[in-house]
Image (cartoon, rainbow, N blue to C red):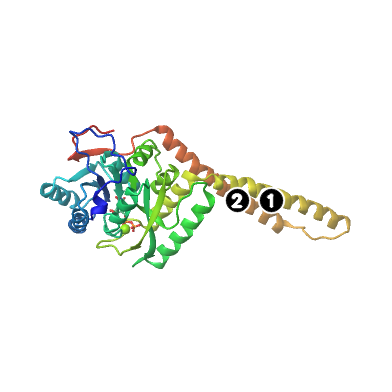
Amino acid sequence: MDAIQTREPDSRPASGSAADDPSPMVSIVAPVYNEETILPELYRRLTAVVDGAGESYELILVNDGSQDRSLDVMRDLRAQDPRVKVINFSRNFGHQVAITAGTDYARGDAVVIIDADLQDPPEVILDMVKRWREGYDVVYAVRAEREGETWFKEFTANVFYRLITRITNVDIPMDTGDFRLMDRRVVDTVQQMREQHRFMRGMSSWVGFRQTGVEYVRRQRYAGETKYPFRKMLKFAIDGITSFSYLPLQLATYFGFFIASLSLVGIVVTIILRLSGSTAFFGQASTLVSVLFLGGVQLIFLGIIGEYLGRIYDEVKGRPLYIVAEALGFDHEQR
Ligand code: UDP
Ligand code: MG
């Protein structure tokens, strides 16, 4: 425990907080959407971990427009323990935006993002803090194993992480989620990135600095159901890819060249066949099939352009990322 409490001289400098402003060392941010049954247990587990390690901390719960009693439970927790702080959104803005708001409001020298459903074991935070004290700026948690997830989720996640690592030029580590610790300077940098369609795990890789991973076993949900049905997962995957890669757009070019060369060969072959008196490639079917095929391909690429265009439109509007209905426990200026 001692090793965790003492700061090594040339590792982490204290962030620029004034002496009369006892900045909590670690801010823990948990996005919450309809997790009333989980919150007390989350609080219990997190407190046991950080208190046991003698860490000073704040726990920021972001209520992302829950329709259940989550907000009431958060208020109760806050009444018990002022280290619990609550951001209440005016409606559901989505997981990634909830994380963003939590990090915006966090004051810690390090910020840990953790899912509220206890799939990310709070005990791993201690490993993260340890690596952070060694001088790492981002410590992400790598899923060595997943418990109790459907094969479908596991399979799609596997494909997705392998795909995104290949097609982006950002070094997004495999099998990591948003469960990670970020140093203050990383948080400040990520905070400047106000893009609407957010892929936070990619963004925190993109900033660079010293990054490392710690392995963990992803647990089952403590209670309740996933808030990520397939539709949302797909949208999130497309957000991740479009945020960090132009490849889908460039595919049109590659495909265009490929089809054009194929047609060129086709033209030459047809001319030769005609000259030699063959009747192959006559008739409507071949015409219809090739026209329909190319029509389909063009529509797909129009759709891909549309995906990027819509995202550009969202950025250009420059709306705020989220609207806070109330913030409990924050006395400082917020963006
Ligand atoms: N979440 C959120 N807003 C949403 C959906 C989810 O804040 O619109 C929270 C949710 O309460 C949980 C975390 O994001 O703390 C991860 O969601 P979930 O566990 O449902 O996703 P999964 O682990 O199944 O991918
Ligand atoms: Mg979960």
SS at mark 2 in the image: helix
Residue 25 vertical position relative to residue 52 in the rendered view, above or below: above
Looking at the rendered structure, the kind of residue marked 1 is Ile
**Residue that extends furthest to the right in the rendered view of this protein:** 276
| Dot 2 crowding, Cα within 10 Å, few <14, some 14–19, many 20+ | some
| Mark 2, residue position | 297
Residue 333 vertical position relative to residue 204 in the rendered view, above or below: above
From the viewer's side, name the closer residue of 126 and 29.
126
Q: Position of residue 27 (x, y in %)?
A: 25, 45
Q: Which mark is residue 90?
A: none
Residue at the (78%, 51%) spot, across then down: 267
Q: Which mark is residue 259?
A: 1
Q: Position of residue 8 (x, y in %)?
A: 30, 46
297 sits to left or right of 153: right
| Dot 1 crowding, Cα within 10 Å, few <14, some 14–19, many 20+ | few
Could you tell me if residue 159 is visible in this image? yes
Residue at the (27%, 43%) spot, across then down: 91
- Is disc 2 in contact with disc 1, using a CB cutoff of under 8 Å? yes
Q: Between disc 2 and disc 1, whose residue precedes?
A: 1
Q: Quadrant of ligand 2?
A: bottom left
8 sits to left or right of 253: left
